[in-house]
Amino acid sequence: SVAMPSRRAYWRSLLRSCTASSQGQGEGAIPSEGIDSVIRSLQAGRMKLKQSTVINRPAAQVWRLLGDGFGDAATWASSIDASWSVGEPLLAGAPARGRECHVAVPGADRLVEELEHYDEADMTLTYVVAAGMQRLTRTVRNTWSVAPLDSHRAELTILTAVEFAPAGHLV
């Protein structure tokens, strides 16, 4: 039988290979001094990722697509085959309680996501994946924030917080 690497060894190897392969390529690079802090987070069973991008559209237009159109993610997210709103809104201004998404990911092909926070004025929403996650994860929470940069551009910031399942739950 082949020995499986420990969770720490696996992530260290993966992150080091990502760092080596992306050196000098800018945005995708993981600074080597940051690998140890990522590994500490993984060992603690959690990880936070933050990504921001500039979109050449007015912030209100971006928010209409992401906030008001929360259930229509399949129209703009290439990783989602189909999506729709589910349930009556529980949060003021929210378009629905959540959404269901069908994705082409083995073991997680149907995701149910529930809105936990929705603020139209601040153009911010938070949702949690309530059902359909792979056994590796316990909780996945995403916060999307849209901020105007000028009258024609907006910055979208996505903060993803992942809590991993204890190693015993993976077997």
Image (cartoon, grey):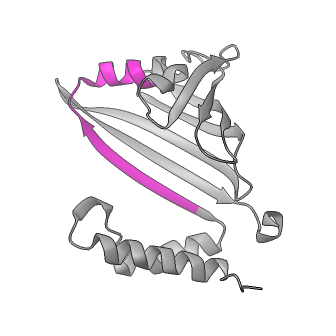
Residue at point 82%, 67% (across, down):
171
- Of 136 and 49, the residue lying toward us: 136
What x and y, as percent, mark residue 5? 65, 83
Residue 159 located left or right of residue 6: left
> Any magenta on residue 50?
yes
- Of 92 and 60, the residue lying toward us: 60
> Any magenta on residue 99?
no
What x and y, as percent, mark residue 72? 51, 20
Residue 55 located left or right of residue 37: left
Residue at point 72%, 86% (across, down):
3
- Of 67 and 132, the residue lying toward us: 132
Residue 29 located left or right of residue 110: left
Residue 11 located left or right of residue 163: left
- Count up the numbered dots: 0
Q: From the viewer's perspective, is residue 35 above or below residue 132?
A: below
Q: From the viewer's perspective, is residue 91 above or below residue 22?
A: above
What x and y, as percent, mark residue 1? 77, 85
Q: Quadrant of residue 138?
A: bottom right
Q: What stretch of residues is rendered in magenta?
A: 47-66
